[in-house]
């Protein structure tokens, strides 16, 4: 046997082994590839169930006195000595009037405050509610008011610009200019009020033990404390505090500027924003039969409703699961 035959012989005899090794390598590569595809595949997130949203407060068509009575009854049941001991719980505190940032530490003492609600109560004008996230009182409230004032300054300038861009004297143009002028004037008044630290706060979301909530409810200036033990976090929880001037049935919310044409570019309307943005797990209401809890409204909530912040809500609310440091 020559050198050529001696070299070629082992190669031919090892061909089945080579083919088997190639097959095993191909199968292994396929398994690894499938594993990589499975690992890199995004998790399938089930669609959110609207029924998981907890709503605390009042909605259009609901009786404010009835809501206040139900809130007091629920707080009394929660703090009854014969009731099982309960830990800290979230609650919606409604105030009897509009207050500034200064009185809030005393009004809400003993609780951890997550957010407050403010509105400039202008006579004859409908102004939107603003949610202000809070960790430190009263500093964060003042900061939120200044941020809102800047947003209203921008709106004032934009409405004035739109009014100047309208030409012609037909009835539609004149109505539009008047609407823009009214919207600009209202925005300017809001900006001035927030910048001065106005008495505009009328509600707060707090977390505390039932005994502390009872103390808050007994303070002068507090209209009602609505405990919400079914709320586990602020995520997917919607708060709708009654405004101090609301004493009967909650009326339909009017549009802020109904006469302003929306087909004219240049002004950014205030988009609806979720009232909650804290990290956390979805919350399911455990007491849908309680009168203080409300059913979803027939129309999507907008920033004109008392539960929804305006575009000036610049920073997300956070879970106030621990008390802020004492001043």
Image (spheres, grey):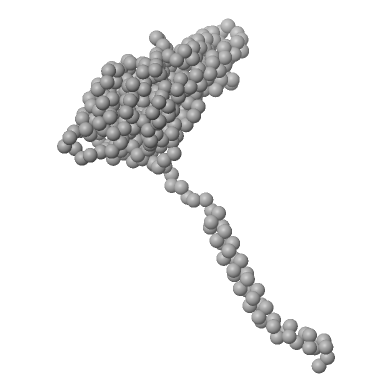
Who's the residue at 43% across and 34% down the image?
A: 318
Quarter that holds the C terminus: top left
Is residue 274 toward the left or the right of residue 167 in the image? left
Rendered location of residue 313, percent (x, y): 48, 26
User: Which of the 4 quarters of the picture holds residue 89?
Assistant: top left
Who's the residue at 65% across and 74% down the image?
A: 22
Nearer to me, 300 or 119: 119
Relative to 161, does residue 287 appear above or below in the rendering?
below
User: Which of the 4 quarters of the picture holds residue 102?
Assistant: top left
User: Which of the 4 quarters of the picture holds residue 137?
Assistant: top left
Decide if residue 208 is in sight here.
yes
Is residue 155 toward the left or the right of residue 323 in the image? right
Quarter that holds the N terminus: bottom right
Relative to 266, does residue 91 appear above or below in the rendering?
below
Q: Which residue in the rendered view is the most extreme toward the front?
A: 327
Decide if residue 301 is in sight here.
no
Rendered location of residue 266, percent (x, y): 59, 20
């Amino acid at each position: 046997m020559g050198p050529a035959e001696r070299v070629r012989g082992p190669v031919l005899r090892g061909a089945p082994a080579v083919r088997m090794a190639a097959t095993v390598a191909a199968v292994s590569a396929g398994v690894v590839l499938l594993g990589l595809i499975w690992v890199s595949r995004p998790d399938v997130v089930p669609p959110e169930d609207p029924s998981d949203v907890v709503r605390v407060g009042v909605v259009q068509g609901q009786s404010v006195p009835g809501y206040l009575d139900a809130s007091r009854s629920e707080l009394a049941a929660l703090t009854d000595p014969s009731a099982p001991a309960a830990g800290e719980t979230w609650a919606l505190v409604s105030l009897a009037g509009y207050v500034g940032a200064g009185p809030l530490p005393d009004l809400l003492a003993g609780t951890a405050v997550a957010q407050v609600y403010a509105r400039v109560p202008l006579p004859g004008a409908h102004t939107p509610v603003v949610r202000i996230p809070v960790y430190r009182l009263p500093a964060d409230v003042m900061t939120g008011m200044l941020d809102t004032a800047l947003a209203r300054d921008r709106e004032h300038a934009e409405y004035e610009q739109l009014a100047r861009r309208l030409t012609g004297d037909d009835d539609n143009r004149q109505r539009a200019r008047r609407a823009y002028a009214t919207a600009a004037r209202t925005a300017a008044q809001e900006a001035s009020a927030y910048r001065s630290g106005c008495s505009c706060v009328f509600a707060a979301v707090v977390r505390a033990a039932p005994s502390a909530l009872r103390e808050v409810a007994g303070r002068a200036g507090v209209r009602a404390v609505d405990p919400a033990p079914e709320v586990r976090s602020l995520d997917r929880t919607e708060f709708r505090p009654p405004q101090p001037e609301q004493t009967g049935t909650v009326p339909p919310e009017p549009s802020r500027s109904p006469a302003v044409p929306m087909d004219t570019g240049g002004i950014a309307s205030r988009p609806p924003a979720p009232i909650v943005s804290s990290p956390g797990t979805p919350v399911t209401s455990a007491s849908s039969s309680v009168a203080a809890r409300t059913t979803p409204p027939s129309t999507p909530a907008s920033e004109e409703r008392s539960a929804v912040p305006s575009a000036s809500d610049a920073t997300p609310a956070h879970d106030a699961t621990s008390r802020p440091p004492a001043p």
